[in-house]
Amino acid sequence: MKNTAVTVKKMLRPGWGSSATLAVASVVLSLAALCVCSFLAGASPLKVMTALFEGALRGRYALVTTLSEWVAMTLCGLAVLIPYRAGFFNVGGQGQLEVGAIAAAAVALSLTAPRPLVVLVALLAAVAAGILVVSVPLVLRLRRGASEVTTTIMMNFACVQFMYAMVTGPLKDPESWYGTTPAVPEMCRLPSFPPGTEIPVGTWVAVLITVGAAWLMSSTVFGLHLRAVGGNRPAAVAAGIPAERVFTKAVLMGAALAGLAGGLQLLGYTFRVAEGWSKSWGMVGIPIALLGGNPLGVLVVGLLFAILETGSRSMQALTGVPAALIYLFQGLPVLIYLGLRASAWYSRWARAAR
């Protein structure tokens, strides 16, 4: 216990209080908490961790399932991170993803054209749907000063209900007894790459988008403007930066990625939209964005969360430890991170005040 306290104090010294260091510490402490909870549940922590990672990565089916979670979580993490850098907290990623998937399904089920064209138009429709959904909170924020946290949360409910209306109405599969779209035709699905691996090309698209976002945010004028607007908007305006334009681009970019996540999930993994078809990818994107801190960090943290989500089922079956502990893990790192971050800020403020 004494050694732990010393380590935490060292982390709060100058140079140790970086976001990356605190994020890693939060994840490590959360894994330790998961091990303790496993022990209290009567299981060996080593067996729990082994079952968790083997269930997520061992075998082709498990690996493809983990990658599908990774794509959705990473893009939803970026959908939070990019607008957040500009000062907009996008909590509506789930709704943007749902509507994006519905738009992609409508195109894939109705458009008769060569495969590349159908896939391209379907994904563009998913992107456009995400942008359309965030337009209402964006306008309310810019013109009326409304809190985007409230408006994007409410848009989530509207989007989910819209999805239910579509899968039980105009897009319902007539041969199904529950609300679902017909399966996307084989010719409209994303091909696998490398061929024969069953890994959809959408996985690599998500990786390339993340790398591109990292370059955009760290090595371009837009990235510089983005940090300026998010860090100190009045100073950015005084410096001649078009703050409202940068703000709008960041928000639309984030929503576009959430919509794209829905399209990629549909065309690459699930092949249909149904009642309860998705998991809470949009909401999980929030802790992923906060812990990742930058696009490449989001990629890594997204993979960790995907492994936890997929492996939890195997963990419960093999060890008897409730899979609900994984949901505890998804929230615990953020609480620890915020606590360490606040302590680091207070430590620096106390030194400066002396």
Image (cartoon, rainbow, N blue to C red):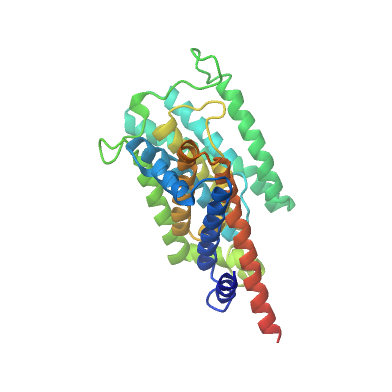
In the image, taking residue 76 as reference, residue 157 lies left or right, namely: right
> In this view of the protein, which residue sits in the foreground, 132 or 339?
339
Q: Residue at x 50, y 66 (%)?
A: 20
> In this view of the protein, which residue sits in the foreground, 56 or 81?
56
Answer yes or no: is residue 85 visible: yes
Q: Residue at x 45, y 45 (%)?
A: 52
Residue most extreme to the front: 42
* Residue 246, picture quadrant: bottom right
**How far from the left and from the top, in percent, is residue 55?**
41, 41
Residue most extreme to the top: 175
Residue 338, above or below 286: below
**How far from the left and from the top, in percent, is residue 258?**
52, 44
Image quadrant for the N terminus? bottom right
Circle count: 0
* Residue 17, picture quadrant: bottom right
Image quadrant for the C terminus? bottom right
Residue 242, above or below 303: below
In the image, taking residue 255 as reference, residue 203 lies left or right, namely: left
**How far from the left and from the top, in percent, is residue 155?**
66, 39
In the image, taking residue 333 as reference, residue 55 lies left or right, namely: left
Answer yes or no: is residue 251 visible: no
Residue most extreme to the bottom: 354
**How far from the left and from the top, in percent, is residue 131?**
55, 43
Q: Residue at x 63, y 53 (%)?
A: 89
Residue 311, above or below 345: above
